[in-house]
Image (spheres, grey):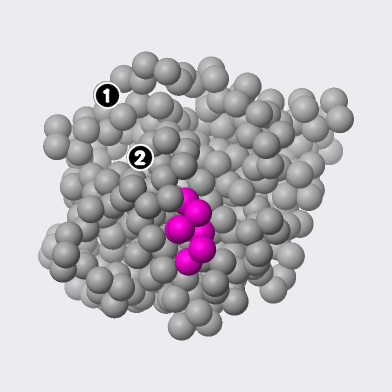
Amino acid sequence: MCNVKSEKKPLLQDLIESAGGCAVTDGGFATQLEKHGAFINDPLWSAICLIKNPLLIKQVHLEYLEAGADILVTSSYQATLPGFLSKGLSIEEGELLLERSVKLAVEARDSFWNLAKTNPGNKYRRALVAASIGSYGAYLADGSEYSGCYGPDVNLEKLKDFHRRRLQILVEAGPDLLAFETIPNKLEAQACVELLDEESVQIPSWICFTSVDGENAPSGESFKDCLEVINKSNKVDALTKKAIIVYPNSGEVWDGRAKKWLPSNCFHDEDFGLNATRWRDLGAKIIGGCCRTTPSTIQLISNALREKSCAN
């Protein structure tokens, strides 16, 4: 569940309106990298390909565009300066890799759009690029982005210090949007909101919460309490004016200790098309997929939303 920060330019709203009231974001990035043979069993996860195989990152972006994605999310979810330093890279090298994550997505978007707009039968829209900022738990790589349990030593200032430089670098790299992803608790949501204000960020952003029951964050705090933190910011519109974004996992469950996905018992890839129209009817403005979803999933979503839009 996500809420989009107010923007001074109607960039995101224009995209949603041109998509017929509901745009499509992309799907699981690491999943698709693995399908192409990338080995990402690493604390950097998909961000390891920023070092080892940046061309594959660009290829996956292109595959999601071809599937109908209106928004590309960068490969920076688990890309952090401390993470790169742990690999023996310098701060400067880490900063360049963060910039690269945005540039690869922008290059993929621009090359795809330059070809698409010359085709008289073009069915695509010019996509936007959202720079991904994963939660502190994603950096820890211990599954805590799914529990919200960061321990007593993690406070508001520590979270802001952790996110600040990455936020600055990603904004400077020139994305269209910012995406704070898998935020598991109220404290980190507050850190993100305060950073947007302190850094005078002008581009649109969204803050996503993970959930297992639809009512509470993994920390056990209610979404209502988490959203109150966001709503108090002058960077954020009133709740009823926000765009709601839905991009769930495939239904499989991540076992943080065993480092593997457990099969889904209740939700399958073919369910995404039907559910996409339900989520849209309930008010979602942007729909896509997260872990273990693929371009095929996004194609199902895109086709379902387009068919409903045409029927209306």
Q: Amino acid at mark 1?
A: Leu
Residue 288: quadrant of the picture: top right
Q: Is residue 187 left or right of residue 155?
A: right
Describe the element under mark 2 as helix, strand or loop: helix
Return the residue nearer the eye: 265 or 68. 265
Q: Is residue 250 magenta?
A: no
Relative to residue 155, is residue 262 depicted above or below? above
Residue 212 position within the rendered picture, expressed as x and y whole percent measured from the top left: 38, 36
Q: Overall secondary structure of the magenta stretch?
A: helix
Residue 133: quadrant of the picture: bottom left
Residue 226 position within the rendered picture, expressed as x and y whole percent measured from the top left: 45, 58
Describe the element under mark 1 as helix, strand or loop: strand
Relative to residue 131, is residue 17 depicted above or below? above
Judged from this view, the residue extending furthest toward the right is: 312
The answer to whether residue 110 is seen in the rendering is: no
In percent of the image, x 68 and y 56: which residue is there? 240
> Which residue bears the numbered disc 1?
262
Region in magenta: 223-229
Q: Is residue 286 left or right of residue 18?
A: left
Residue 279: quadrant of the picture: top right
In percent of the image, x 76 and y 44: which residue is there? 21
Q: Which mark is residue 299?
A: none
The answer to whether residue 78 is seen in the rendering is: yes
Return the residue nearer the eye: 186 or 4. 186
Q: Amino acid at mark 2?
A: Ala
> Which residue bears the numbered disc 2?
30
Return the residue nearer the eye: 59 or 42. 42
Q: CA distance from mark 2 to mark 1?
A: 16 Å
Q: Nearer the viewer, mark 2 or mark 1?
A: 1
Relative to residue 24, is residue 37 depicted above or below? above
In percent of the image, x 44 and y 76: which residue is there? 194
